[in-house]
Image: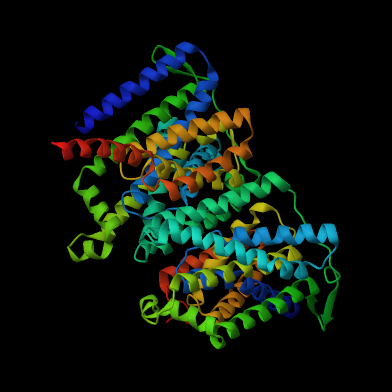
Amino acid sequence: MRSWTFFLSALAVGLALFALSLGLGQSYLFFAGYVVLQYVVLATAWNILGGYCGYVNFGSAAFFALGAYSSVALHKLGSNIDRYASGLTADILHALLPMPVPAMVLAGGLVAGVIGLGMGYLTLRLRGVFFAIATLAMAVVLQTLVINWNFVGGSRGAYVIRPDKVELGSLSLSYVEYLCLVMLLLAVTALTVARLIERSRLGYGFATIRDDELAAEAAGVPTLRLKLVATTVSGALMGMAGAPLPYYLGYVEPTATFGLPYAVNSIAMPMIGGTTTWAGPLIGAVLLGSLQQIATVTISSAVNLLLVGLLLVVFVVLAPKGIVGLVLDRQRARVEPARGKA
Amino acid sequence: MGIPIDLLLNAIVAGLLLGGFYAAVTVGISISFGMLDVVNIAHPAFIILGSYVAYILNATFGVDPILCALVALPAFYLLGAVVYQLYYVAFERRGQEALRGLAFFFGLLFITEVALILVFGVDYRYVQAPYIGPTWRIGFVDLPLRMLVPCVVSLLLVAALQVVLTRTFIGRAIQAVAQDQMALQLMAANPVRIKRIAFAMSIATAALAGAFLIIIQPVEPSVGREYIGRVFAICVLGGMGSLPGTVIAAILLGVVESFTATFYGPSWAPAVAFGFLLATLAIRPAGILGR
């Protein structure tokens, strides 16, 4: 299947589900759906670097928060332009702001992508383990910067007032439904990008890095450049996933936005689904994301985090190839005895 | 610049004391990550576990927290042996330690933290001991005992470990594993057994480090996260697995952090440690006393 066909058919499936949920008229479905879709984007983004290249990123939450906070900064700037700028700058800003959410998503992606590139440039020359530790370090540095940055609310957090309804052509959507639609588009885009990478020269290059970086380097694969592409794309997608968050919650503060649950989920979901294909993170995110939504409502939010941690450890120990790997192994087992008889 | 001399001196002394404590926190990582190449990012979580053990024993029996830690040492040693065995069977033997081993320890960190939150809640816990509170004053320099006692005991701990590593048979075997595992196998020694002992020792130090932590400051389950960056920064800066290097790096970080907290405000202190780590990784990944 060509990428465009894939993109359009995935979008068609997503829109059909969206229309179905609209028909059911359950607004909670959109609240939960937004979170699950957001995790699809995060898990896919993590997998581009972690699954394809084999470099573990513990700082997903930081990239995610960068997206969220770039939205907050743009929002704050948009509502107080005349306090911070004058003359021509103010005119330009008045023309640009307030931005619609999709534009915020692009802005968040840009910021996180640039940081991802810088981060990769600093640390990717080192062994994989150091990269992993450095991402953890970067998350805390960025969190401290945001806590001390009063413009976006510092440690008190920031409120973002969102409109009640959005008119798209003749369709009138509540704001959460609108955000869910934006996230749906983003998730489909992320999956298409991951699938495109997987089947291109880039993806084969990534796989050589994962399997044996030294041999890849010796064979002439430009490993550093490929890894920088991976951190940038992965970081940008995570930033995009975070950008609508302030509008979804109405309030963001650093501790929760930079929280460990985002980092753990974006690692656990691809690991549980399977890290070598685009389908793995999707399966993991939908399963684990829905499970968490159910557990949060029925049990408690602390227990659902424990569940994620336990599942991660169990899968990593017992089923290192994830659900996709289990299914593929079973298929192969079914095919091979048949071949043996013939 | 008119920095008052007493403020400066106090910042230096506070940093030295803090650095001594950081040495105890890091020494476990220096063994597991520096020598054995096991990237135990869950180490800070074991330290917090140590803090809670000290808290429970102190709250119910009124035992001195450091004594509690000594009592808990064998239990932590066993825990470490079990974790290493699991890690070995699931990852190291299959040669998958890079990606999945990291995820495993990350999961362990997360599970410990959430489990502690479920049991104890997110309230800050603290211990009672006669040396928490009083402060010695020498001239205009303050020596709070709650910092001084952990610092001294921690330096003793590192010194003892250094003696064990350089003077005893098992210690030398651990260093041999760090240098060349294959050669050790040729000497008919079992590297897995030696690594298990070393890893168990590294987790055992977490019991003491945890007790020091809860003496120095009240503890809640997510405090451990702040230490992930610190311990790895110190370990890398100290040259991966060199205990004297670890002490030097720990004291350096302690002093820099104390200066930042004194002159720019405590909310910037965590960024210092991590910034330090990023700079070390970017400029000199081999560390101060690196091989």
Q: Residue at x 44, y 73 (%)?
A: B191
Q: Where B177 sits versus B265, above or below?
A: below
Which quadrant of the figure has residue A329? Answer: top left
Q: Quadrant of the C terminus of chain A?
A: top left
Q: Quadrant of residue A283?
A: top left
Q: Is A211 or B285 nearer to us in this picture?
A: A211
Residue B100 placement, left or right of B253: left
Name of the residue lying farthest toward the bottom:
B167
Is the image coloured rainbow, by chain, by secondary structure, or in one colour? Answer: rainbow
Q: Nearer the viewer, residue B37 or B176?
A: B176
Residue at x 17% of width, y 63% of height: A219
Task: Say if A166 sits above or below A339 in the image.
Answer: above
Instruction: Report x, y in % for residue B86.
Output: 49, 58
- Residue B178 rendering spot, x and y as whole percentages: 44, 77
Is residue B160 visible in the rendered image? The answer is yes
Residue at 67%, 62% in the rendered image: B265
Q: Is residue B262 visible?
A: no
Q: Is residue A93 above or below residue B17?
A: above
View extreme (left): residue: A342
Residue B107 point in image, percent of width and height: 52, 50
Quadrant in the rendering for residue A118:
bottom left
